Amino acid sequence: MTPTVAQKVPVRSQPPGKAKRRRTVVAPHRRDNRTAYLMIAPMVILLGIFVIWPLIYSVYLSTFEISFYQEPVFVGLDFYRYVLESPEFWHSIVIGLYYALLTVPTTIVMALLLASFIKSLSRRAAAFMKTTVYLPAVVSTVVASVLFVFIYQDEGVGNWLLGMLSVGPVNWLNDPHVALPAIAVPGIWLGFGVTTLILLAGLLDIPENYYEQAQLDGAGPFQRMFYITIPLLKNVLLYLFVTGFTLAIQMFDLPLIMTGGGPVEATNTPNLYIFNSFRDLTPYATSFSLTASLLLFVVIGAISVVVFRLIRSDKAVDG
Amino acid sequence: MTPRVLRPTANALLIVLISVTIMFPLAWMAIAGFKGRTEVLRSPFQFFPDMWSFDNYSRILQDPEFMRAMGITFVGALIFTALSLAVNSLAAYAFARLEFRGKRFWWVYCITPMFIPMMAIMLTSFMVVTKLNMLNTLAVLIIPGVASGAQMFFIRQFYLGFPVAVEEAAMIDGASRWQIFLRLFLPQSAAPFVVMGIASYLAYWNAYVWPVLTITDPNLTQIMQFLGTFRSTRGNDWGMLMAGSTLASVPTIFLLLIFQRFIVNGVRISGIK
C-alpha cells in the first residue's frame, strides 16, 4: 500500500464548494478488545502512575489542613468553600479567560493566513519560512519575558514605533487596561510557530482539485476559505482551539516576570494567583493553593467540554 | 496587471517583513549576549552594544558545565521525543480505528490530563517519583511526561482522516492490526510526527521547574537549570543569560532545518476522506 493508493480513495466526485462530507464509517470488524488494550496499555499505565494517581492523591490531600508544624487535620471540603468564596480566585479566572480570548483566536487567524501564504511560495522560500516561523519557540519564556520588558520600557522600541505614528507614549505594563494585551503579544509570538506549522500541514493535505473546481465555479478567495479550507481543517482547528485554550488559561511565567500580576491585579492569571497564594506562606498556603488548582482544573475541563461539543455538533469530526 | 513580475516582488517583500518581525527579538537576544552586565538593562533601549565584547560567549563556551548540560539535555530530549511518539501514536491509532469495550471511558481517561494544571499535581507527582526512587536519574526527567493526552489527541485527529478503504483492503489480505499500524500508518505519519516531535523536544528542552525539583546531581543538570543560575546564585547576569540562551538554541535550530522538509505536500494530516 503506497501513498498513491491512499490518495485515490477520497470521494473525488463531490462538489468541492459544498463542505458536506460523507461520514467515515469505521471499518466494520469484530471488536478488537485484546489488540486495543495492548495498544493503549503503555499510555494508560504511565498516565495512571504519573498523572491520575497524583491527581487522586491531591484531591485526598485537599481535604486536610497541611502545615509544616503539625499533623494534618481533616477538614473536609472547607478549603473548597474558602477558595470558591474568594473573589480573587474568580477574578483570576476572568483574567485567564480574557487572556485566552486575546491570544487563541488571534494566533489561529494569523497562523492560518501565514500558512496559506507559505503554501503559495516556492519550495526554497517555503523551507526558509517554515524554519523562520518556528524560531521564536526556541526561546524560553524567561528570555522572551525579559525581552519584552525592554521593548515595553518608557523609552523602548514599543513607544518608539508609536512615536513614528505620532501616538503615545503608552505606559505598557503599568496601565491596567493595556497590561494584559501587552503580555498577550509575547504569548502570541511564542506560540505562533507551532500553530502555523500545524495549519500548514493541514492545508497541504487538502486536495488541490477542490480549489481548482471551486475557481471554475467562480468562487473568490473568501468563499474558498470559508467553504473549503475551514470546513476541511475542522479536525485540526478543534485540536488547536482546545489545546490553545488550556495552555492560555494556564499562562504563568509571562505575567510572573513581566508584571508580577499587577497593575491592580490586571494580569493576575489563575496559576499566578495560585502561585502567589502558595508563596504567601500563611499556615494554610499549601492546602489553599492545592485546592485552588484543583478547582481550576474543573473550570478548564468544563469549558473544554463545551468547546468539544460546539465543534463536534455538526459531525465534522468523528471517530 | 503583470502578475508575473508583481507576485514574486510582493512575496519577497512579505517574506522580509514577516521574518524581520519574527526575528527581531531573537536578534536582540543574540546581540545582547555581546553586551556587558549592566548594559543589557540600560534605558533608553539600544539595539547594538557600545562595544562588542565576546566575553560572555567565550566564558560560556569554555565552561565544561555548559557543554555537559547541553549534551545531557539533548540526549534526554531525543529519548523523550522518541518514546512519547511511540506511546502516544499507538494509543492514537487504537482510539481512531478500533472498537473496544470501555472505549469512551479510556478516551476520557487519556484526554483528561490535558486539562490538569501542573500546580495541581506537582506536589503529589514529586511524592510519587520520590517513592519510586527516581530522583536524580535521567528517568525522572523522561518517563513522567512521556504519555501526553494532547499529543495522542493530535495524532488521533490525523489518523481519523486516513482512508478506511486502504485499511479494509489490507485486512482482507490478512494483515493484523499491528501490521496495519506499522506498515500503513507509521510510514505516512511523517508530518504529524515532525510537528509533535518538535513540540515534545522543545517541552523537554525548555523544562525548568521539574528539573529543579528532581535533579540535584550536577552531572545531570539540565540546560534551563544551568541558564537559571545566571538569574539567581550568580546574581542577574543578563549578558550571560542572553549569550547562553542564544547558544542553547543552536541545536534546536539545526533540528528544525533538518526536519522542516517533512511538512510538505501530499502528506495526509487534516482528515479529508
Image (cartoon, coloured by chain):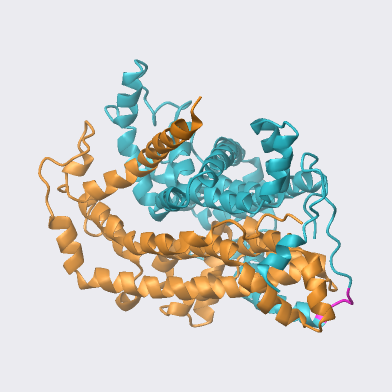
**Which quadrant of the figure has residue A263?**
top left
Q: Is residue A140 visible?
A: yes
Give the residues drawn in magenta, as a range.
Answer: A29-33
The residue lying at 25 percent from left, 60 percent from top is: B233
The residue lying at 34 percent from left, 15 percent from top is: A166
A125 w.r.t. A91: above or below: below
Whether residue B184 sits left or right of residue B125 in the image: it is right
Hue of chain B? orange
The letter of the cyan chain is A
User: Which residue is most to the top?
Assistant: A166
Magenta: main secondary structure: loop
B99 w.r.t. A179: above or below: below
Which residue is at the front of the view, B202 or A247? B202
Q: Is residue A121 magenta?
A: no
**Place of residue B167 in the rendered image (x, y in percent of width and height, measured from the top left):** 78, 72
Q: Is residue A71 visible?
A: no
